[in-house]
């Protein structure tokens, strides 16, 4: 289900070029609009659809897999912490879903170096970062030697 | 197009910025505060790798805190699933560490669905737990967290 760009909405900002994991969203040098240079390599990950400030990118289903005429739209609102999906079936049925995308504020995840410096003698143990506390059990399981 | 080669020195080089690479870089920085750690990724780390699009499940969680599964159980499962062709020591090691990783992700803000009666994570299989993982990757820790991605606005 490769992406395609609505050229009347796209303003050529390049957010999709930046975010595409496959590097297949490019800006057409003549028309200055984005387009999918290699639809066969598209993962349908929707990263560009979510990133597009103009909502100019859509995903087209393969005709043998998804009947023509349907529509899947997504609105990601990171500042509200929700993502909303709107699924329109070919027969006109509409389904809408809204899901939370995180429970904590953006920017609140601590970087590794912002944690208290660990005792480096623990490097010789089998524990990883934040263990054993984060395991929520008393100790890291180990194999008992017979 | 002319390509330029840029040389970068590092103490630890992580190749690939998917979840595995990001985890390795995090672990390296946790222990090695003064090291120069370089993570190399061909795309935007925010959405690169196999979980670019987000996930609706974590496919491996023991639930050792509730006695649901033990690492030995997972080794048995993986051995059967892969017809014996597994490094059992590595499978065991992944299984015994995975719970702490999941717990950190919940602390960082990953919504995990829970049974309101028991408070345990909801499962959709013996090993799977259910999450709202759209921003699984974008919210994972980074050296200095960048501002949230630009919001999409406008009407559908």
Image (tube, coloured by chain):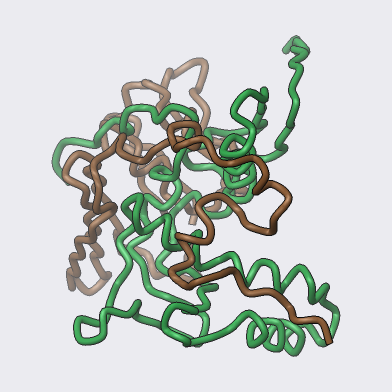
Quadrant of the rendered image containing residue A57: top left
Where B47 falls versus B80 (above or below)? above
Residue B17 visible somewhere in the drawing: no
- Residue in the image at 32% along x and 28% along y: B147
Q: Which chain is depicted brown?
A: A
Where B75 falls versus B97 (above or below)? below
Where A109 falls versus B147 (above or below)? below
Q: Is residue B73 left or right of residue A10?
A: right
Location of residue A60 in the rendering, given as x and y in whole percent from the top left corner: 42, 55
Quadrant of the rendered image containing residue B73: bottom right
Q: Is residue A52 left or right of residue A46?
A: left
- Residue in the image at 42% along x and 75% along y: B129
Where A24 falls versus B124 (above or below)? above
- Residue in the image at 25% along x and 64% along y: A87
- Residue in the image at 22% along x and 74% along y: A91
Q: Is residue A96 left or right of residue A143?
A: left
Quadrant in which the C terminus of chain A appears: bottom right
Give the camera-side residue of A118 and A66.
Answer: A118
Q: Is residue A21 left or right of residue B16?
A: left
Location of residue B10 in the rendering, given as x and y in whole percent from the top left corner: 74, 22
Q: Which chain is depicted green?
A: B
């Amino acid at each position: 289900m490769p992406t395609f760009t609505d050229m009347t909405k796209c303003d050529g900002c390049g957010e999709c070029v930046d975010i595409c994991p496959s590097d297949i969203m490019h800006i057409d040098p003549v028309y200055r609009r984005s387009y999918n240079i290699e639809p066969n390599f598209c993962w349908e990950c929707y990263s560009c659809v979510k990133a597009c400030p103009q909502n100019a990118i859509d995903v087209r289903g393969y005709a043998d897999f998804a009947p023509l005429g349907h529509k899947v739209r997504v609105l990601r609102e990171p500042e509200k912490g929700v993502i909303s999906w709107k699924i329109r079936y070919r027969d006109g049925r509409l389904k809408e879903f809204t899901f939370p995308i995180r429970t904590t504020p953006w920017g609140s995840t601590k970087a590794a170096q912002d944690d208290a410096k660990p005792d480096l003698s623990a490097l010789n143990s089998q524990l990883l970062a934040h263990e054993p506390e984060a395991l929520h059990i008393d100790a890291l399981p180990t194999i008992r030697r017979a | 197009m002319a390509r330029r080669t840029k040389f970068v020195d590092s103490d630890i080089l992580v190749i690939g910025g998917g979840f595995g690479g990001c985890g390795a870089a995090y672990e390296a920085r946790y222990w090695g505060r003064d090291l120069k750690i370089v993570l190399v990724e061909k795309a935007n780390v925010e959405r690169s790798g196999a979980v670019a699009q987000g996930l609706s499940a974590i496919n491996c969680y023991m639930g050792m805190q509730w006695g649901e599964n033990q690492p030995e159980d997972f080794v048995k499962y993986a051995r059967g699933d892969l017809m014996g062709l597994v490094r059992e020591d590595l499978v065991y090691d992944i299984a015994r560490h995975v719970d702490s990783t999941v717990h950190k992700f919940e602390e960082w803000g990953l919504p995990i669905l829970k049974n309101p009666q028991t408070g345990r994570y909801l499962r959709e299989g013996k090993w799977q737990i259910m999450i709202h993982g759209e921003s699984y990757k974008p919210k994972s820790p980074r050296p200095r967290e960048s501002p949230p991605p630009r919001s999409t606005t406008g009407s559908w």
